[in-house]
Amino acid sequence: MPKTQSKTKVNRKKIYFDDIRSRYFEFFKKRGHVVVPSAPLVPENDPTPLFTGSGMQPLILYLAGQPHPMGKRLCNSQKSFRAEDIMEVGDNRHTTFFEMLGNWSLGDYFKQDQLSWFFEFLTDELKLDPKKLYVTVFSGDNENKIPKDEESINIWKKLFAKEGINAMVVDLVTSDTGSKLGMQGGRIFSYDAKHNWWSRAGPPENMPPGELGGPDSEVFYEFTSVKHDVKYGKNCHPNCGCGRFLEIGNSVFMEYKKSANGKFEKLNQRNVDFGGGLERIAAAMMDNPDVFRNDVFQSLFEDIRIRHGWNYDDANESEKRAMRIVADHMRAAAFIIGDGVTPSNKEQGYILRRLVRRAILNAHEFNSQTSDLYVLIETITNAYKISYPDLHAKSAEIQEIFKEE
Ligand code: GLY
């Protein structure tokens, strides 16, 4: 068990979510965007998904063409929850709850502005090293007559050239072929729809009639401290699972709709739907592949250290795994309860119950008396005091529900 009085120093900058969020909003406000509030985690007018899992979900009607009351340029930080990732939590990069920084063009700007702005935000505003950024684009879909995204390739080439980087294009197609072919000195990589097409339902063949989607272009940050692990394939490439590359932003060029006959038709307006994980952008800023090194999780780990004697900095992988599961699940549970869900045996309530129980189970690793685990909720709500005052105001209520469960 890690000792409380450890002197281990981990070399890291302090990165605050509040700071990244406000810099993102300021950056996009200067470019004509209106900041819209995050929608609740339980979708309001859409019974299909249990939770809001991306910033575009609440905007679907506006992406389809209905005028938005706040205009054509919007941005926000959307509370998001992906239940499908629950069993992945425990490694250094998966969380169930996350905040998605988003900006949208509802039939206004398109690829040129979007890719240039995001690159500028990362390199000029956040000061990420452009040499550590790699990008992917859509390689095209012959069956559905959707061409390769040459426009994005040309935009990226020019953006990298301005930074003195000669960006070579490599066609990788799938993760399997990507692993066979490897990096090949490339900077811009094209993949098929499995990686570079985005819709709520996934690739084109999974989209129901009426669903909107489009090719996307993702930006990856390279952690040079992570060496490729052949367990994930012979050669590394941006979509490799080894952890060397982390996706930090996805610009979806949402201009297609699947029609009733299964063919793809162009929408009347060309949209941009951008989503970038706040936790992941923070990890890139720290140049540390562990997304649990941000201010929110670190204050929670500090609380665990004080109360239970476990020190995250000195913990081995299995101890870290338990601490990450507790931290992730308790944060997710706090936000879900904060949005009005209570534990039950169905739908959102059932997912919440699973989170609470898995948190308690993993907390047994560092504390045999988990009955007082609920007090950690206060550390979480305090960490979000400025950005989510409603959550902070409900802290006692959330703790009560957690305690009862
Ligand atoms: N809507 C874009 C994304 O979730 O990546």
Image (cartoon, rainbow, N blue to C red):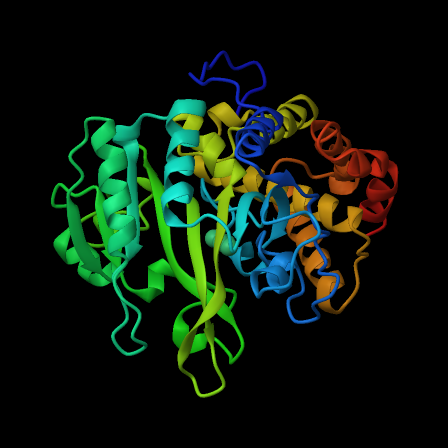
Q: Residue at x 42, y 37 (%)?
A: 118
Q: Position of residue 164 (x, y in %)?
A: 19, 26
The quarter of the picture where residue 176 lies is bottom left
Judge from the rendering whether residue 139 lies leftward or rightward of residue 377; answer left or right: left
Could you say which is closer to the camera, residue 19 or residue 35?
Answer: 35
Q: Position of residue 156 (x, y in %)?
A: 27, 42
Q: Residue at x 48, y 35 (%)?
A: 291
Q: Residue at x 50, y 51 (%)?
A: 108
Q: Residue at x 32, y 77 (%)?
A: 144
The quarter of the picture where residue 371 lies is top right
Judge from the rendering whether residue 124 lies leftward or rightward of residue 167; answer left or right: right
Could you say which is closer to the camera, residue 20 or residue 254?
Answer: 254
Q: Can residue 226 be seen in the rendering of this structure?
A: no
Q: Position of residue 356 (x, y in %)?
A: 71, 51
Q: Is residue 11 above or below residue 265?
A: above
Q: Can residue 222 be seen in the rendering of this structure?
A: yes
Could you say which is closer to the camera, residue 90 or residue 135?
Answer: 135
Which residue occupies the extreme bottom position in the image? 261
